[in-house]
Image (cartoon, helix red, strand yellow):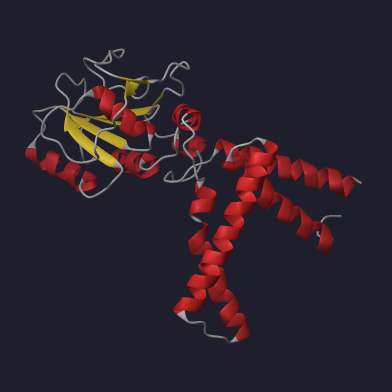
Amino acid sequence: MLGSVALAALLIGVIVFAVINQGSGAKGTLAQVDKLSGLIKSDTANGKARHVTGVVSYPNQASAPPVNGSHNVLPETCAVYSQKIPNEHAVHSMEHGAAWVTYRPDLPVSQLATLKGEVNGNPYRLMSPYPGLKSAISLQAWGRQLFVDSASDKRVKEFLGSFTNGPTTPEGEKILLDRNIDILPDVLANSGGVTVSYYEWVQNKRSETWTLEEVDEKLERAMKRVYKNVDDFARQRKVDRRIASYALALARIESVYKEREIFP
């Protein structure tokens, strides 16, 4: 009885941890990366983040780019821009995990080149000048902002490494779900590589060599089966696919623990 209670407590704890720290692209948990010196946090848009048309007015936008709130229905393409871009389009990009680098137009050429090197070619980073900016450079992600005086500041890499391709925000997820747009959780979408790694382990243990076609066939069959299980669970329990993925995974762990009597 005591073992069952301990197991249940562990599973609940893991679910809570997974939900709080969901998403890919961040190095470590949000609690860890939020310790970055000088980081300004704005975790909420007061429940008012909406897709709108036209120009949006943001607080303190004259000297500081916005980091959340209502935004245009179209996100800004992630790229390096030489002209100021509309705030409301950049905010939409951040809602979907982009990091936005802004700088004063008079930033030295050498520093500009450094920033471009961090942004160019990354599909989840955009960069643009921001006249009136209160520091030489500012870095933005959804709900997070950092002001620095130099592109060589080590926090630039730390910020971009932590928040590029961050998780879809709760506000963004709600909009997608309200529009009946399917969201595939990263714990499921990213599982293909781990599955193939498992296949490699099996081949080594058995001293076997599978053809590429065999691996592809096994992977496709496994991914389709798991997706169906997750989708069925989500529909039956009326939860999203992320919760369904965690619940099914933890249920499998629970069954193995019980079968092997791992817990006392």
Q: Is residue 38 above or below residue 164?
A: above
Q: Is residue 69 left or right of residue 232?
A: left
Question: Position of 100 compared to 144: left or right?
Answer: left
> Viewer-proximal residue, 80 or 244?
244
Residue 175 percent location from the top left of the image: 45, 28
Residue at x-position 69% and y-position 38%: 237
Question: Which residue is drawn at the image coordinates 72% and 45% (left, top)?
Answer: 11
Of 183 and 2, which appears nearest the observer?
183
User: Can the viewer see residue 204 in this picture?
Assistant: yes
Q: In the image, residue 98 lies at what x, y percent? A: 33, 38
**Total count of labels:** 0
The residue positioned 22% from the left and 17% from the top of the image is 63
Rendered view: 51 above or below 161: above
Quarter placement of the C terminus:
bottom right
Asked whether residue 153 is in view, the answer is no
What residue appears at the point 9 percent right and 35 percent down from the top-left corner?
Answer: 108
Residue 253: % across, % down: 72, 55
For this view, does 12 lie left or right of residue 32? right
Q: Nearer the viewer, residue 179 or 142?
A: 179
Q: Is residue 199 above or below residue 250?
A: below
Q: Is residue 106 left or right of residue 67?
A: left
Return the residue found at the far bottom: 207
